[in-house]
Image (cartoon, helix red, strand yellow):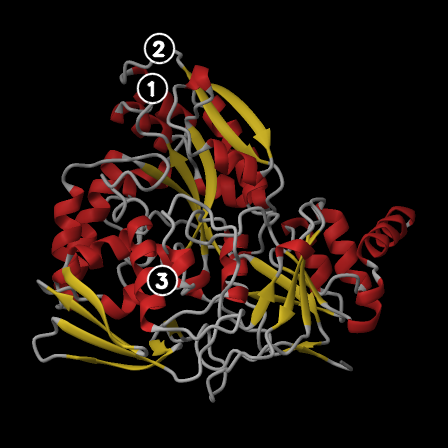
Amino acid sequence: MRLAAALALSAAAVLTTPAAAQQRPLRAVMNIELQVLDPIVTTATVTRAFGYMVYDTLVSMDSKGEFKPQMLEGWKVSDDRLTWTFTLRPGLAFHDGAPVTAEDCIASLQRWAKADAFGKRMMAAASDLRAVDARTFELKLTRPFAFVIEAIGKPNMLVPFIMPARMAALPPNKQNTETIGSGPYTFKRDEWRPGDRAIFRRNAAYQPRNEPADGLAGGKKPGMETVEFVSMPDPSTRVTALQTGSVDYLEVLPFDYIDLMRKDKNVKVVIQPPMAHIMGGLSVNNTQPPLDNVKVRRALQMALDQKEILGGIGLPADMSVPFCQSVFLCGGPYQTDAGTAPLKDASPEKARALLKDSGYNNEPIVLLHSTDSAMINPISMVLIDQIKRAGFNLEVISSDYSSMAQRRLKKEPLDKGGWSLMPVVWSGYDMINPLSHYATAYSCTGNYPGWNCDPGMPELVAKFEVEADPAKRKALATEMQLRVLDQAPQMFLGQFAPPTAYRANLNGVLRTGVHTFWNITRDGS
């Protein structure tokens, strides 16, 4: 009790400001700290949440997985499906007062497509993307591409957010210093206190769609005057702050506290819908020895027991899938068990046997361990033990996620600051479609850390992107899965529904798994 009281006082002291006492901001503790403010240069989930606050999208996905106009008034497609014409809603403006124009949309899509595999494939099929007038632009294709709206409405990494053309003129690997969008909230860098909080103010000029919010679509009404992303690395401090009302929202409830919070009448614990499930993943550097050897990767894959990993993180039965090696997510449209049977009996013994035959000679393997992530940390702890038991010479580097994510961009050898493995979490939104999946869409593109390249994969992805028949799409996805499980470019550690918790006096919280903060009001506010 004394510890809880001390933590509560500490949390309150950290969060109390004169402005907070007057406004009662909505305070959210994100899974990791916000460090990067450009959603095109990183796949960090907190930067994605930042993006949805500050920017807007042309098309959005609703709660049923259907794509609806957002910034767009609508679109038309020619009979041959090679010319797509998009028209913006009238009256859209950026935070600096400048109108949103077709040129801004074109520049934003072009920048995004240089970094995103889905966008890159769409633009490879295009001959022209041009403005017709201030509110209208046109995409001309040279060949069929069956997923134009799905690409433009992509809900997860990387999201095609619309920004001013001057910002979109930057290369996608160079971070913008401006944060001017047209979204429901504004962000000023001079109010940002890294390591403490990021503060968002309601955009009074924002014009939400005149329809109810539904998933990521519909009317994005900024119900709270101020929203703060609060930095709070310690899991127990996060929970205590939620219990006392010092914070309102935990993106990820630390797993050890699920049962306790379910009994608290002042807190709601919610399970995200299937599309928003998380797959624990192991990002593998395919370019550095010894994991450039597919036989060593197969041995590593056999060491990873999903049942043990999910058991180790301590989720209730209703929040996890007992076994899922379906590359395109269990519960998704392309789910299949093809090729998964051997992995149901993964074990250190089987891994050691494969390792012995692989030519592995006790070379070091460097694993990047993110200690501040409520999801990744417990997965990593079990994973590290499994890899060591399988006989790998494992070196563990531990730090915060942002630092590890920066190191994961390095292509240098291990003795010069490189890496071998990094446990991560992948959103179901990215995994349900081969055109956005990291193991398929990014194969041989050089755009995703790990830099896997299966020479046979790009041809399958190219066939999939033009295929309109659902049965043939499913067959192609199954063929891709067999290749992924055989080549083991990345590995799958278990599927689960990340628990989110928030104060019971919040209304209008949307269950999207993407963690947006429009549509929310608080009782008594």
Of 28 and 464, which appears nearest the observer? 28
Work out whether 408 lies above or below 323: above
Q: Give the residue displayed 32% in from the left and 59% down from the top.
A: 432
Q: Do the residues bearing badges 3 and 1 touch, measured as CB atoms within 8 Å?
A: no
Q: Quadrant of the C terminus?
A: bottom right
The residue that mark 1 highlights is 290
Q: Quadrant of residue 110?
A: bottom left
Q: Earlier in the sequence, mark 2 or mark 3?
A: 3
Q: Do the residues bearing badges 2 and 1 touch, measured as CB atoms within 8 Å?
A: yes
x and y, in percent, of residue 334 in the image: 26, 59
Label for residue 331?
A: 3
x and y, in percent, of residue 367 in the image: 48, 27
Q: Give the residue displayed 35% in from the left and 10% down from the top.
A: 361
In this view of the protein, can residue 453 be seen by the observer? Answer: yes
x and y, in percent, of residue 13 in the image: 86, 53
Three-letter amino acid code of the residue under disc 3? Gly
**Element marked by disc 2:** loop
Whole-angstrom CA distance, mark 2 to mark 1, is 9 Å
Three-letter amino acid code of the residue under disc 1? Pro
Structural crowding at the residue carrying mark 1, measured as other residues with C-alpha within 10 Å and reported as few (<14), some (14–19) or many (≥20): many
In this view of the protein, can residue 159 be seen by the observer? Answer: no
Structural crowding at the residue carrying mark 3, measured as other residues with C-alpha within 10 Å and reported as few (<14), some (14–19) or many (≥20): some
Task: From the viewer's perspective, tell me whether residue 76 is left or right of residue 313.
Answer: left
The residue that mark 2 highlights is 361
